[in-house]
Every structure is written in structure tokens, then in C-alpha cells.
Image (spheres, rainbow, N blue to C red):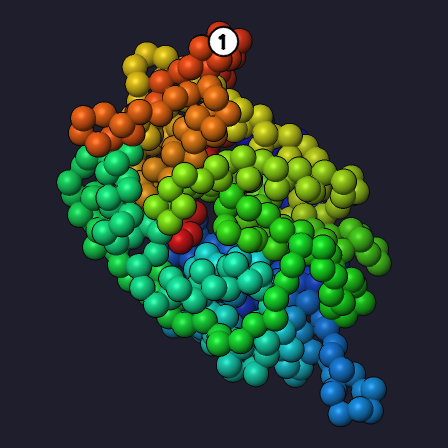
């Protein structure tokens, strides 16, 4: 456990759900942990006791379950779900499938779950339509447009660029289909699941319109934080060719501040890592983390105008494979863009067509005040 983690309270210690099993984290709220075949080797999914109106005019309630997030589509993950169905549902059906956002580890099996149980998909409109689009073709971290975008930001390794160019079907391989209908979730909406009422809290910067869910009770206040609030690693925040002028980092920082009014004893249920208390500490840690990285990037730009590729070793102290490089490039661009949009850097395009950034007079003053320090590592999870 690193120094920052030690400031958080892991409510269940080192307890993890066994494969095909669950851990009850609050009455009627169960934690599932499924394996992923990536460096980020797991995702947390959530099973909530629920009931819905039978719809026959009798007022009768049908008991069952709501699923929050789905895992990627693969034979292995379907088998993991089948074990849950066989042993953890008490013979009751899945009534609803909620997806926090459109990244493959969250929505990959939504089509299968919804079809198998004839259950509706609940998701934000933006993430629904982006998932539909990406499942039918090239996504933001693969294909010709992605390779050209990263090349314009200084990525020059021909093998890496060729690999990115050839990744047209990356998203579709993990998300082969998306349900043709959905129930829209919006910021501020409330929905009842079992005995709890949950409020939708939208977030940006990591996904187009991520939806976290907060319930004040009964009992322990709970935050289903998705990828917006992770305890050990920093959420990947990237700019891609689909929104080339984006300010994803500012959007992310503004979004996590929306959790600040929640109670101090809120138990956060993240998509990766372990349930924890210390939400407000974690919000500040993430602000500090990105402030430190921005200071490092600004300091690097003082030495010479730099591209996103130039600042990869500033942000990432380890060797990156092709898969990680796409996310790392997106993250580097996000940090440069925040400094550029804030007026600390200016952007120019050199004779080779590469965007390079150098400090403005304001940025030089900021760099003189900053003292970059060591920070936690940026996460590079499976995303689209």
C-alpha cells in the first residue's frame, strides 16, 4: 500500500469476491469481481436487489436484480456470469442492466445480458450512441484517423503507428453489439432500486457522459463511482482524434468536484480496486496528482518546445506497449491542452506538421512558482 492509499479506509480490508461469488457490501448490494485479460486485470461489477411493477395493473411487484456494469464480451466472461446466475440470484431474474459508461469493460456484455434476461439497458444518451457507433467500426484509439492524430502530436515510431492504424476492430472485438433500445439516464435523475433511491451524477473527461450513482441510505451512504473515483490509480483522461481540441482534463477535474458535497462517511464502490471511505481525501489527492503532472509538463516545455510524444517519459516512468501508448498519448495531449487553454502554453505546428507547445509569459511565471514533486502513476486501463 502506498502513502496515498494509507490515507483511505478500505472498509473490507483485503477481502475480495471469489470467482463466481459475491460479497455483500451493504444490505441488498453485492460486489462481483471479474477477471480481465489486460494489465488492469479486473473489474468490479455490482448486483443490487430490486423489484419492478408487474405491469398488469395489479400493483404486484416482481422481485429480481439490477446489474451495474457488465465486463467485456468473451466466452470467459459469459462463463463467469453463468456461475453468478446459477449460485447468486436466489432463482430471481435480472430486471435491469445499468452501464456507467461506454468503455468495453463496462458495456461489452450489455447486449448479451439484456437479451438473455429480456431486461432494459440504462445508460446516458451520449455514451449509448458512441458505443453504438464504435461497435460498428473504428474507434478513437485505432484506425487511420487515430494514427494520423497521434502522428500530428509527435508519435513517430513506425511500428507503433502501424499497429494503431491496424486496430480498426479493437472496440468491436470487445463490444460486438449494443442493445437497440435504452433507457436514458441524465444528471440529477433519481431511480429506485430495491429499498434505495439513487441519484445520477454525470462526469466528463474520462468518457463522454459517465453516470455515477449515489444513495444516501437507508444505512451507509453509497457511491457507485464507476471509473470516475478509483482508490489506487488515477483514471485515464485523454484527448483523441474524435474531439481533437478537447480539454478532457479540465472536464474531469470539474466532474470529481461534484462528489465533494457527499457525506464524509460515504462508502465508494469503484470499478477497479477495493471499496473505500475517504472520498474527500481522494478528490484532493487527484487534484494534487494532476497539478504535479501539469507542473512537470510545464517545466519540460521550458527546455524546448515539446510535443505530446516528447512528454511521455515525463508522465510515464515505465516502458509502454502499443496498447498503453495510445492511452498515454491521449493523456499527454490532455495535460498539454489544459495548459494551452489556460494560457500557460502556446501551440504551434512545425514544418513537419507536428504540434509543439512552449510556455507563454504567463506560463513562465507559473513555472517559476511550481515545484514538481513525485506523484502516483497514471492508470492506463482498458478503454475505448
31 is higher (above) or lower (below) than 91: above
264 is higher (above) or lower (below) than 304: below
Q: Residue 270 at x, y = what percent?
A: 60, 50
Q: Residue 177 at x, y = what percent?
A: 41, 72
Q: Residue 152 at x, y = what percent?
A: 26, 36
Q: Is residue 237 visible?
A: yes
Q: Residue at x 18, y 37 (%)?
A: 157
Please state if 137 lies on the left or on the right of 61 as rendered: left
Disc 1: which residue: 365
Q: Residue at x 68, y 67 (%)?
A: 48
Q: Residue at x 44, y 10 (%)?
A: 361
Image quadrant assignment for residue 264: top right
User: Which class describes the residues within 10 Å of circle 1: few (<14), some (14-19), or many (20+)?
Assistant: few
Please state if 3 lies on the left or on the right of 38 as rendered: right
**In the rendered view of the protein, which quadrant contains the N terminus?**
top right
201 is higher (above) or lower (below) than 137: above
Amino acid at each position: 500500500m502506498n502513502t496515498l492509499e494509507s490515507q483511505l479506509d478500505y472498509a473490507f480490508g483485503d477481502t475480495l469476491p471469489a470467482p463466481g461469488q459475491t460479497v455483500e457490501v451493504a444490505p441488498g448490494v453485492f460486489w462481483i469481481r471479474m477477471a480481465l485479460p489486460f494489465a488492469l486485470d479486473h473489474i468490479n461489477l455490482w448486483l443490487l436487489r430490486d423489484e419492478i411493477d408487474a405491469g398488469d395493473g395489479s400493483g404486484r411487484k416482481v422481485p429480481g436484480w439490477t446489474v451495474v456494469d457488465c465486463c467485456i464480451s468473451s466466452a470467459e466472461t459469459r462463463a463467469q456470469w453463468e456461475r453468478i446466475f446459477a449460485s447468486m440470484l436466489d432463482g430471481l431474474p435480472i430486471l435491469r442492466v445499468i452501464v456507467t459508461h461506454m468503455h468495453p469493460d463496462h458495456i461489452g456484455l450489455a447486449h448479451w445480458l439484456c437479451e438473455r434476461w429480456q431486461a432494459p439497458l440504462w445508460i446516458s444518451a451520449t455514451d449509448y450512441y458512441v458505443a453504438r457507433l464504435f461497435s460498428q467500426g473504428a474507434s478513437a484509439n485505432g484506425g487511420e484517423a487515430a494514427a494520423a492524430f497521434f502522428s500530428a502530436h509527435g508519435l513517430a515510431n513506425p511500428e507503433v503507428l502501424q499497429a494503431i492504424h491496424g486496430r480498426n476492430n479493437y472496440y468491436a472485438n470487445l463490444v460486438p453489439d449494443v442493445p437497440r433500445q435504452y433507457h436514458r439516464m441524465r444528471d440529477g435523475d433519481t431511480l429506485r432500486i430495491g429499498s434505495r433511491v439513487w441519484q445520477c451524477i454525470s462526469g466528463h473527461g474520462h468518457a463522454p457522459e459517465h453516470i455515477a450513482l449515489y444513495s444516501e441510505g437507508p444505512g451507509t451512504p453509497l457511491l457507485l463511482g464507476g471509473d470516475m473515483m478509483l482508490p489506487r490509480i488515477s483514471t485515464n483522461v485523454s484527448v483523441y482524434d474524435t474531439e481533437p481540441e478537447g480539454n478532457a482534463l479540465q472536464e474531469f477535474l470539474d466532474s470529481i468536484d461534484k462528489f465533494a458535497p457527499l457525506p464524509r462517511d460515504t462508502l465508494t464502490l469503484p470499478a477497479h480496486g477495493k471499496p473505500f471511505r475517504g472520498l474527500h481525501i481522494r478528490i484532493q489527492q487527484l487534484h494534487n496528482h494532476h497539478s504535479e503532472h501539469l507542473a512537470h509538463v510545464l517545466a519540460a516545455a521550458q527546455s524546448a518546445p515539446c510535443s505530446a510524444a516528447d512528454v511521455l517519459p515525463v508522465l510515464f516512468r515505465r516502458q509502454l506497449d502499443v496498447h498503453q501508448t495510445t492511452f498515454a498519448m491521449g493523456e499527454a495531449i490532455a495535460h498539454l491542452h489544459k495548459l494551452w487553454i489556460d494560457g500557460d502554453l502556446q501551440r504551434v505546428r512545425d514544418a513537419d506538421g507536428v504540434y509543439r507547445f512552449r510556455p507563454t509569459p504567463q506560463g513562465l511565471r507559473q513555472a517559476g512558482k511550481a515545484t514538481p514533486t513525485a506523484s502516483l502513476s497514471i492508470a492506463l486501463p482498458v478503454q475505448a
